[in-house]
Each structure stands twice: as C-alpha cells, then as structure tokens.
Image (cartoon, rainbow, N blue to C red):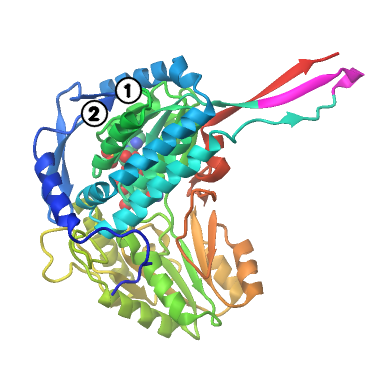
Amino acid sequence: MTVYASGRPAVSTFTVPEYAERLKRALGGSPQQLLIDGKRFDSRSGETFETVNPATGEVLARVAKGNAADVDLAVSAARRSFEKPTWRRMNGYDRGNLLLRLADLIERDAEELAVLECLDNGKPARLTRLVEVEGAIKTFRYFAGWTTKFGGETLPVSPRGGAEILNYTTREPVGVAGLIVPWNYPLSMAAWKVAPALAAGCAVVLKPAEQTPLTALRLGELALEAGFPPGVLNVVTGFGDAGAALVAHPGVDKIAFTGSTEVGKEIVRACAGNLKKVSLELGGKSPHIVFPDADLDAAAIAVANGIFFNQGQTCTAGSRLYAHASCFERIVNAVGDIARKLKIGDGLKPDTDLGPLASQEQWDRVNRYVGIGRDEGAKLVTGGRRPPGLDGGYFFEPTVFADTTAQMRVVREEIFGPVLTALAWNDIDDLMEKANDSVYGLSAGIWTQNIKHAHRAAAALKAGTVWINCYNLVDPSTPFGGFKQSGWGREHGRQAMELYSEVKSVWVNLS
Ligand code: NDP
C-alpha cells in the first residue's frame, strides 16, 4: 500500500537496477576522495572509512576520512576563492546562472543521484528521486532567483541639526560558511544550505554525515562542471571530529548545521571562539492533532505518512498523535492498519514504501526506545520489531503505541524512527498545554474542518511550522526552522539569504 503522493517524478523501474549495479561496481574501486579547491584528494592522514548500504549491511564504498588538517586546507581554499574577483566580483545575474546550470545538471543526473542516495541512505529510490533530487533542483532554481533580487534599501533617517543625509544598506556575503548536514535527507539538506550560501556569494566547506557522504561529493563535482570557480564549494567527508574542526576554525565566518540538539549545543559553545554566526536546525517531537470534526480518513493517512515517511527519520515527524477521545480508537486503528500494509524492503524495488533505517546505530536506538515504551506501560498496537524475513539490513516495523502519558520518555524524547505515540484528549486547553509541553518546537499538524479551531490552535502552538489539514509540506519559498530547542534561524525563503549575508549601513552627508 502506498500512502505517499503520486503523480510526481518517478524513477524508471527499468533503469534503477541497471544504475544500482553500475554504481556498486564504480564505488567498489578506489576510495572516494575529498573535494578541495576543485581537485580530488586522499585525506592527509591517508585514512578512509566505510559507508554501508543499510538495506543489506554490505560495504558500498570506502571514503576519505578527513580530519582537522583537511578541514584547514578546505577552509583556506574557500577563503582564497571567496576573496578572488572571479567569485567576489561576479554579479548576481552570473551567479544565478551558475545556480541554474547546477540545477540542470542535477536534473540531467537525477536517476543516478536517486539510486546513489537510495544505496547510501536506504530510502526508496522513487522517494529519493522525489524528495532528495527534485527537492535539490527546486532549491537551486529558487535561490538562483534571489541573486538578482536580494539587496539593501534606502532608509529615511532623521539626523540632529538638519543635515541632509542619504542612508542606505547593502548586503554582503558573510564569507566562508561551514555547512554540516545529517544523514536523513543528505542531498536535500546539502542543497538547503549550499544554494542560499552560494546565492549570497559565500564560499563553502560542506561536511556530510559519515553515514551518507556520497551525494555531497557528486554535488561538488556537478558544481565544478556547472562552472563554479574551484574552491567555492569544497566537500570534506569524515566523522564528527571533522565537523568539530570546521566549527572551531577561526577562518570560518558562519556555521549552518542540521542534526541533533545535543551536537547543536556543542556547536554553539565551540563557535564562541571567534563568535562566528550560527544557524541550527535541530530535533523535534511534533504533535499531530485530530479534532472530532476532521475528515478522519484523510487525517489517518496523514498521521501515518507524517510519522512513517522516511522511516520516521525526519525532524518534523509527527511523532505525538493527539486525537479527540471520540475518534481516538478509529484513528489509532486506521493508522495501525496502514502501518501493517506498508511494504518494507530494499528501496531499489519499485513497490517499497519503507526502506531500512539509516544505520545499525539508528536501529539500536529505535529498538531501545520501543523497549522503554513497553517498560513504561504503553500499549503496543502494532510493530515494534524487525520485520520477519528481513534480516540483512536495518529494517524496523512501523510502530504505534497507544495509552501513552505525557510523562513517558517515548512521548518526550526524539526517537527518530517509525514510532508513533498516541494520546486521547477531551479539553482543548489541556490539549494545547500537552502539545506544547516539549523542549522542541519545530512543527505541528492540525486536522479540523472548523476554521476557528484551526486558527486558534495554529496561534497557540509553539512551533516554527504549522500544517492545517496537510502535513510535512516544505517549499524553498517559505521559512523553515524551530522554536525553543529546535533551532536558531530559518532556512528557505528570504530568511535563508539573510543567514548568509551581513547588512552594512552607509551614511552619506549630502549637506
Ligand atoms: P549528529 O547531530 O551527531 O550529526 C549531524 C552532523 O553533525 C553529522 O555530519 C555529524 O558528523 C556532525 N557532527 C557530529 N558531531 C559534531 C561536532 N561535535 N561538531 C560538528 N559536527 C558534528 O546526529 P547523529 O547522526 O549522531 O544522530 C543522532 C540523533 O540526532 C538522531 O537519532 C536524531 O535524533 C538526531 N538527528 C536529527 C536530525 C534532524 O534533522 N534534526 C538529523 C540527524 C540526526 P558524523 O556523521 O560524522 O558524526
């Protein structure tokens, strides 16, 4: 059963296996090298690490393990290219054309990139095509438009003494940006940061997650092919220590990070050294609220989709269901039925709904939380284990817990897997208190046909995004980010351009 949107770009069932075989052969050769200053290098230490296909547990490729020395080289390359007139003085129209060309090249290689991401991350190829690749194309095209529209303004100042003053502001690129991305949406998270950073005129060092380094390296190569000057986009693969070296580097002016709240806090502490600018997209524990007057069939599908999409490894996953007591059983049963019908398997197969979790570590984490939920007394409606017959990879059944309470750890902590906790509500004030009772504030969903309920709830929820009668819609034109410990700043839209630029106020005495 497919609960995901259809009718959007799909991958061809004929070419997926062909690409997969070709990619596996190519990746099985020499290690994937770092991309610094437009050239491919081994890491200074010569060390490599393995990236694994989570559907099989088999090694997919060996990858250069960058460390502080490599980060230093990449930052120097970025600094040089940032200062060179070829990039620094390039006008917005030409920068926009480079971004458009990069989008075209991603589109040219869309199927190959989709299969590569499927092999490295595990999510079904039709979804990597739809979410990762199409998302990246859209993001680069969107930010290409800002290069000719993002500027300053003229302001009506009122100086003492009646001097005639012209005051205007300009926007300048912040400088060298360190971009650290996670493994759950590798290519699209990279695009969310690289596109506005380059549109603003920054030079960047991109550090992908150790679990999913491959599409970031391809993105770097495609940027060179598009004509970006060498050193404008550098890619350093490696572990958390490479990320930490980037964060601590005095030559980096800005850090943009997506990942865990815990590492986000470490980053804030580490950025204090040179007070570099920081933006953070962190965890979530989003409430998905169903009113009794909702279209209950549509709500049940959205609740299932909201938590199970990407195997629940989504920062905005609607992981806490609050359904009104009068429809609680119906919604929970419907979500349980959908969960049991979802097809779990290798993402290379055309009918797979849920692939594996991204790593053994993630499987262990989800399994541990299911044990905690059971011990806390939550009622397991469905799932909670490895699907029978799928022993090779990191597969986990979509799981629903009912009879949960606000105090349970499974309700309070981010599991980052396909695990829904469900709670019945009666009183709207009590509901809002519970929905907001979280250290996170990334997103929330509301299902109701009553316009007053919808807008009152949207206003009361402490969340960066609220979806009404829909869930998990994102678009480059609308801001994305969190309240509370879900982050600092907003990606997408004009707000993302602001993250990668400084404002300068210029005073001209005309008297
Ligand atoms: P992390 O936050 O550790 O990793 C995210 C990125 O940060 C990776 O590129 C990672 O590198 C890098 N990194 C790790 N440590 C540091 C550091 N000290 N300084 C700079 N960069 C660093 O997430 P995990 O992969 O460990 O996942 C753990 C949990 O985080 C998940 O279970 C989930 O709850 C949450 N998470 C949330 C995400 C979101 O979208 N909000 C995305 C991913 C995870 P490396 O991969 O090499 O460690």
Where is residue 466? Give x, y as percent: 54, 61
Magenta includes 160?
Answer: yes
Relative depth, front residue between 151 and 66: 151
Where is residue 79? Give x, y as percent: 41, 18
Q: Residue at x 36, y 17 (%)?
A: 76
Where is residue 468? Give x, y as percent: 55, 67
> Which quadrant of the structure image shows residue 178?
top left
Q: Residue at x 31, y 37 (%)?
A: 219
Q: Residue at x 23, y 59 (%)?
A: 12
Q: Is residue 260 visible?
A: no
- Image vertical order of residue 444 relative to residue 427, above or below: above
Q: Cβ–Cβ below 8 Å for labels 2 and 1?
A: yes
Residue at mark 2: 34
Where is residue 237? Give x, y as percent: 25, 33
Q: Mark 2 falls on what kind of element?
A: strand
Relative depth, front residue between 261 and 473: 473
Please tell me which of labels 2 and 1 falls first in the chain.
2
| Image disc number at residue 62 | none
Residue at mark 1: 74
Quarter in which the N terminus is drawn: bottom left
For the record, the magenta segment spans 159-169
Q: Residue at x 52, y 30 (%)?
A: 93
Q: Where's ligand 1: which quadrant?
A: top left
Q: Give the amino acid type for the residue marked by disc 2 in the picture.
A: Leu
Q: Mark 1 falls on what kind of element?
A: helix
Query: Marks 2 and 1, how far apart in space?
Result: 9 Å
Q: Estimate how packed mark 1 is, as few (under 14), some (14 to 19) or many (20 or more) residues with alpha carbons within 10 Å.
A: many
Magenta includes 283?
Answer: no
Query: Viewed as shown, does residue 417 lie left or right of 427?
Result: left
- Image vertical order of residue 439 relative to residue 99, above or below: below
Query: Viewed as shown, does residue 46 lie left or right of 286?
Result: left
